Image (cartoon, rainbow, N blue to C red):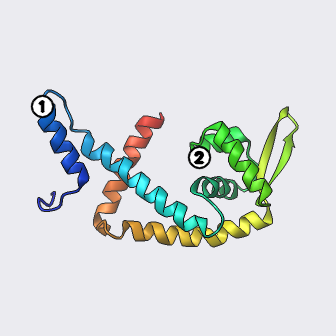
Amino acid sequence: MTDPGLRDVMDDVHDRWRELRPDLDVSAIPVVGRVNRLARIVQRRSDDLLAEFGLGRADFDLLAALTRRGGPMSPTQLADETLLSPPAVTKRVKGLLAAGLVDRSANPADHRGYFVAPTAAGRRLIDRVLEVQLADERAVLAALPEEARPAVADGLRHLLVALEG
């Protein structure tokens, strides 16, 4: 049940569009608007936190993907895993190479392609940063009641599965 006294900016956006354009179905605004707004807030928090370690969120995501995978990945695999564009992956890989956090090796099956893997320094950094990042993510969720989290996660999972195919 929604708390009638609890309102946010998306309630105002929804209500204003409903007033201005009663002919339109604006029912998606509260969900999609909140997801977008939350994503931006979390991204900003994450970027601020990770800057202390010399990383941005995209750098962290690439390094985390490489570490989770436990083996080299192609730029295409990294783009698929992180939802970054191929040019963004290339840019981030160059920065991580320069910082000594990843290594690049030739792809023997494709002479134009290459693989990327974390260096020992990259793995050490992700180990340190991951703890701090996860603590911040838990802090973000602190305002969401514990009993509501599974339903929120499940609803978002349904959306992702439908949208990602």
- Name the residue located 60 percent from the left edge and 65 percent from the top edge: 51
Residue 159 sits in quarter: top left
Badge 2 element: helix
Q: Which residue is mark 2?
A: 82
Distance from Cα at disc 1 to Cα at disc 2 = 39 Å
Q: Is residue 122 above or below residue 109?
A: below
Q: Nearer the viewer, residue 133 or 152?
A: 133
Q: Is residue 13 above or below residue 125?
A: above
Q: Residue 3's x, y, as percent?
A: 14, 61
Left or right relative to 28: residue 92: right
Q: Nearer the viewer, residue 82 or 26?
A: 26
Q: Which residue is mark 1?
A: 22
- Name the residue located 65 percent from the left edge and 52 percent from the top edge: 62
The amino acid at mark 2 is Thr
Left or right relative to 11: residue 61: right
Task: Say few, some or many: other residues with alpha carbon within 10 Å of mark 2 (under 14 / 14 to 19 / 20 or more).
Answer: some
Lower sequence index among marks 1 and 2 = 1
Q: Residue 152's x, y, as percent?
A: 33, 55
- Name the residue located 64 percent from the left edge and 61 percent from the top edge: 55
The amino acid at mark 1 is Pro
Left or right relative to 82: residue 157: left
